[in-house]
Image (cartoon, rainbow, N blue to C red):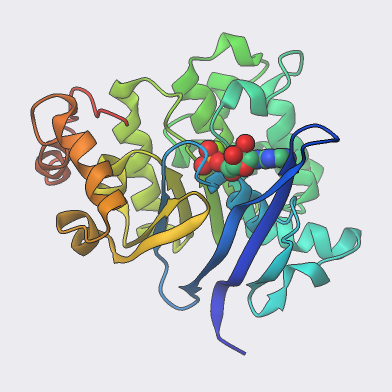
Amino acid sequence: MTGALLSLEGVTKGYSTGGLLARTAFNAVDDVSFALNASQPEIFAIIGESGSGKTTLARMILNTVFASAGTIRFRDKPLAAVRGRKARLDFMRQVQPIFQNPYEAFNPLKRVDRYLYATALRLARAGKGEVDGVCDEALRKVGLSLAEIRGRFPHELSGGQLQRTAIARALIPRPALLVADEPVSMVDASLRMSIVYLFKTLRDELGMSIVYITHDLATAYYISDRIIIMQKGRVVEAGDARAVLDNPQHPYSKLLKSAVLSADGVGAMEQVTASASNPRVLPADIPTL
Ligand code: ADP
Ligand code: MG
């Protein structure tokens, strides 16, 4: 018993690539360990540039990709033991995903409210008469309402509205943990901070923990409690978000930070920090790496 909400110990995922004659094996995720506290909700950021293994790690936490080595536990139960329909549904009630591209997460031919209804019936165990209320309540947490999205197809909503709908869907079962894989990188810069700010609210008001995956140091600096920085599948630096990003030690972390600071000649982090005291003042643009 560790008492952790989520714990990873030596988690590794190996793949092999190349043709039949020239196969090479490599670890997309290599010996990653960390734990989220069960009693203190937190935003835990996983930072790294493209190809560093973030999505593979997210999928392992969501139990859709299986680790080649190491152990992931949710509330002390190894994910390898989450087998069978009932156990899987129970896990999905507690751990919900948010993906990078909301237009890929929703079938373009299916009205978006159908996803919300299905989640309410299946995961929130809502009765037929309660479904509308459950969906509307979740949508209101993200600044939308059922009336606004009812009957709409994905292409009839803006990227920001659709991503907020995806977040609302994830909130319906009232999960303890959200795994958000680059949730704002497809969203217009002007809306990015409002979604990032929403994650803070979910942590503070609903007590949700969030694994926030990003290549964007500025938003990570603004909302995260702790971070890990990944390079080529390995964790190169870990710790308190502000401490690590204010004073990175590893050369790769320093490089990531200098890339942000030189992106527009202005310190993006200072810009974000300035807006944090007044969330209504949104930074004009947050450079990404
Ligand atoms: P990130 O999300 O940080 O961009 P990914 O986890 O998507 O990184 O990928 C990490 C590495 O693993 C990349 O080199 C990618 O090409 C490789 N990879 C991811 N999924 C597979 C797979 N199913 N088979 C082979 N290689 C994969
Ligand atoms: Mg990815």
Say if 111 sits above or below 93 in the image.
Answer: above
In screen coordinates, is 195 left or right of 61? left
Residue 184 x %, y %: 42, 32
**Looking at this rendering, what residue extends furthest in the bottom direction?**
1
Say if 52 sits above or below 40 in the image.
Answer: above
**Looking at the figure, which quarter contains the C terminus?**
top left
Q: In the image, what residue occupies the spot 57% across and 48% down?
A: 171
Residue 134 x %, y %: 63, 44
**Looking at this rendering, what residue extends furthest in the right direction?**
84
Residue 109 x %, y %: 76, 13
Q: In the image, what residue occupies the spot 74% across and 28% down?
A: 114
In screen coordinates, is 202 left or right of 86? left
Q: Nearer the viewer, residue 103 or 215?
A: 215
Residue 28 x %, y %: 61, 49
Tell me where residue 111 sits by quadrant: top right
Q: In the image, what residue occupies the spot 65% across and 23% down?
A: 104
**Looking at the figure, which quarter contains the N terminus?**
bottom right
